[in-house]
């Protein structure tokens, strides 16, 4: 059964289930009307024991060590079991997300003369707290109900120290700034579903999800004039409340032998209530205590409520053509209304038809071909509709919103071949895809009410995306390495769109060209232990982001991790993890142009690299 939730996801629920509750794990490679999950390559089905009278308490405690020699504890408790017809699972979690990041940026002017050097130290103190509950009650032989709930707190306070050396003076001069950025976030969610199975094996199901996320962020910047003497020069306060309400009902019935149909409708309401206040020490207005004692700045589209009401009737036909072939046909119709009120008032209506075909052919018991054709429509980020904080550029405080943003549409074609090696040795697969895009969302320029140009996320026209993905997971017993599992992933892709600023053909902004990932796991039963590592490297060459005033190139070092785990005789598990033992570095080269990039005249070159170092974790798990 799919978990009725967005934040309360199946992955987090599975991590709280004790191993002794699990009867078996199934891999489902075909399609069926009996499945709650549609459109997946495969479904991993975790089957619990029908009767498990005992309850169990699972615990996990961890201690994290960070690059700046800070130590943070964390832990999780899960209590689950069965009482009559009721299955229950409760969870409590507290996990640290501390981060220490160092950044160095050097700048040269357009004539290649030195400009300045910036060093930045950023410390984020963050701990996520979460409480969850999952209940499953069998009302009778043919009906059941499930209820899920979650509440989370995730406060993140960030402090920044920034040293700027002016290299254009002789002798050079040094400026020190610091920033305080408290960030308070919380979220809750309630979801549930009811299912009734009729005597002819037809099924009625209804589910609901209600959630809310609150984000209150403040950024204040201070110029340190001398030790103990400083002046504030930036106040940026943003508040956002996201709400979502979903109701979905469906009826599944047998049409003929080997065929079934699911018919239903989904209604969703999504709301963003956003406000932003900006103040600086520059201007002619009067300082305000409500703006941190600085002079309020006028920001367009700073206070808005964006609401979408969406209806989606759907029809899914499953056809088991023969024992080796299946075809799933889906037709969805999306009808929505998006209304924005506040500083901007705008209402628009949209409708889309979204068909899909999913064909599967078992060429042999171990070799499966899958072909899909699907029309997709992206879900819009309402944060792009309103003014928002810009944390990526110290020279820009606010990103403008675009009230005319529309959904990105795509015809997606995929062909997948999977081969499961004999004797459960492993599996290899390959996938080629092509996406024909309409209304691509990327950076573009819009004219503000004052007549100036602003850069926003907007629709820039048609585009395409295509590539190849391949995976392998092989047990190495055939070469004398029993208990060793090696995994590999290789992907390469490209894209094309017409740039809205220069009119040239280019890749999409921040388009990842591919990656290669390697993994290794060695189980040693005699020692009751296992160990392994993973390594992931992206292809970063010519990875650019085009904007109104600058062009950026980004690249990063590979990500890596390793672990060692020991299962003690008393049922306790001890695990040591090292994430990024080789420090991960991300670099960005930014070319700022005189005026706009259409001028072709580079005003400044910026070379920025940041690093956040390794994280070491010692974890202890057990079950009572």
Image: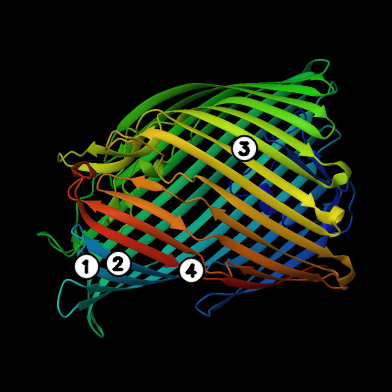
User: Dot 4 lies on which element?
Assistant: loop
Q: Give the Cα separation between the discs numbered 3 and 2.
A: 52 Å
| Residue receiving disc 4 | 612
| Residue receiving disc 2 | 106
Q: Choose mark 1 or mark 4, whichever is in front.
A: 1
Compared across the picture, whether 613 is left or right of 207 comes to: left
Compared across the picture, whether 286 is left or right of 69 comes to: left
| Image marks 1 and 2: residues in contact by CB distance under 8 Å | yes
Q: Choose mark 4 or mark 2, whichever is in front.
A: 2
| Residue receiving disc 1 | 114
Between 264 and 428, the one lying in front of the other is: 428
Location of residue 603 with respect to 570 vertically, above or below: above
Q: Give the Cα separation between the discs numbered 4 and 2.
A: 19 Å
Q: Is residue 290 visible?
A: no
Residue at x 21%, y 61% (from the top left corner): 112
Q: Give the Cα separation between the discs numbered 1 and 4.
A: 27 Å
Q: Choose mark 3 or mark 1, whichever is in front.
A: 1
Of callouts 4 and 2, the N-terminal one: 2
Q: Can residue 220 be seen in this view?
A: yes
Of callouts 1 and 2, the N-terminal one: 2
Of callouts 1 and 4, the N-terminal one: 1
Compared across the picture, whether 233 is left or right of 121 comes to: left
| Image marks 3 and 4: residues in contact by CB distance under 8 Å | no
Compared across the picture, whether 44 is left or right of 459 comes to: right
């Amino acid at each position: 059964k799919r978990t009725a939730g967005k934040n309360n996801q199946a992955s987090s629920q599975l991590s709280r289930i004790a191993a002794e509750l699990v009867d078996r794990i199934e891999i489902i490679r075909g399609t069926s009307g009996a499945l709650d999950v549609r459109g997946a390559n495969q479904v991993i089905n975790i089957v619990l024991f029908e009767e498990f009278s005992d309850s169990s308490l699972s615990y996990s405690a961890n201690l994290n060590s960070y690059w700046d020699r800070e130590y943070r504890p964390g832990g999780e408790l899960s209590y689950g079991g069965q009482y009559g017809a009721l299955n229950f699972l409760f969870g409590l979690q507290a996990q640290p997300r501390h981060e220490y990041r160092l950044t160095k940026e050097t700048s040269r002017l357009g004539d290649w003369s030195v400009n300045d050097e910036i060093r930045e130290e950023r410390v984020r103190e963050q701990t996520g707290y979460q409480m969850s509950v999952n209940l499953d009650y069998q009302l009778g032989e043919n009906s059941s109900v499930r209820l899920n709930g979650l509440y989370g707190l995730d406060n993140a306070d960030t402090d920044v120290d920034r040293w700027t050396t002016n290299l254009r003076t002789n002798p050079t001069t040094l400026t020190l700034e610091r920033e305080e950025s408290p960030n308070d976030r919380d979220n809750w969610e309630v979801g549930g579903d009811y299912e009734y199975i009729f005597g002819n094996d037809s099924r009625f199901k209804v589910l609901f999800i209600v959630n809310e996320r609150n984000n209150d962020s403040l950024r204040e910047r201070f110029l340190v004039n001398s030790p103990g003497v400083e002046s504030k020069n930036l106040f940026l306060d943003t508040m956002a409340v996201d709400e979502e309400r979903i109701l979905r009902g469906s009826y599944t019935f047998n049409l003929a032998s080997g065929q079934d149909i699911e018919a239903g409708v989904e209604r969703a309401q999504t709301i963003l209530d956003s406000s932003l206040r900006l103040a600086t020490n520059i201007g002619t207005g009067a300082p305000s205590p409500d703006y941190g004692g600085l002079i309020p700045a006028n920001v367009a589209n700073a206070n808005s409520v964006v609401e979408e009401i969406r209806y989606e009737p759907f029809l899914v036909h499953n056809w088991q053509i023969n024992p080796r072939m299946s075809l799933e046909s889906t037709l969805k119709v999306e009808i929505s209304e998006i209304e924005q009120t506040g500083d901007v008032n705008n209402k628009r209506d949209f409708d889309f038809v979204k068909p899909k075909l999913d064909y599967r052919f078992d060429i042999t018991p171990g070799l499966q071909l899958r072909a899909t054709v699907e029309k997709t429509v992206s879900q819009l980020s309402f944060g792009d509709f309103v003014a928002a904080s810009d944390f990526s550029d110290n020279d820009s405080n606010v990103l403008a919103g675009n009230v005319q943003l529309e959904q990105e549409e795509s015809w997606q074609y995929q062909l997948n071949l999977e081969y499961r090696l004999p004797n459960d040795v492993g599996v290899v697969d390959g996938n080629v895809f092509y996406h024909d895009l309409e209304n691509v969302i990327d950076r573009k320029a819009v004219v503000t009410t004052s007549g100036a140009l602003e850069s926003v996320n907007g629709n820039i026209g048609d585009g395409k995306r295509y590539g190849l993905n391949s995976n392998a997971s092989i047990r190495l017993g055939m070469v004398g390495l029993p208990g060793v599992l090696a995994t590999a992933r290789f992907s390469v892709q490209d894209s094309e769109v017409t740039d809205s600023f220069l009119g040239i053909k280019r890749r999409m902004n921040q388009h990842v060209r591919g990656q290669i990932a390697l993994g290794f796991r060695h189980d040693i039963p005699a020692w009751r232990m296992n160990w392994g590592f993973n390594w992931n490297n992206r292809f970063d060459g010519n990875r650019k982001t085009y904007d109104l005033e600058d062009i950026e190139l980004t690249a990063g070092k590979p990500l890596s991790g390793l672990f060692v785990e020991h299962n003690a005789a008393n049922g306790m598990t001890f695990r040591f993890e090292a994430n990024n033992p080789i420090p991960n570095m991300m670099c960005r080269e930014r070319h700022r142009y005189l005026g706009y990039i259409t001028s072709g005249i580079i005003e400044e070159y910026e070379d920025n690299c940041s690093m956040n170092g390794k994280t070491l974790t010692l974890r202890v798990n057990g079950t009572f």
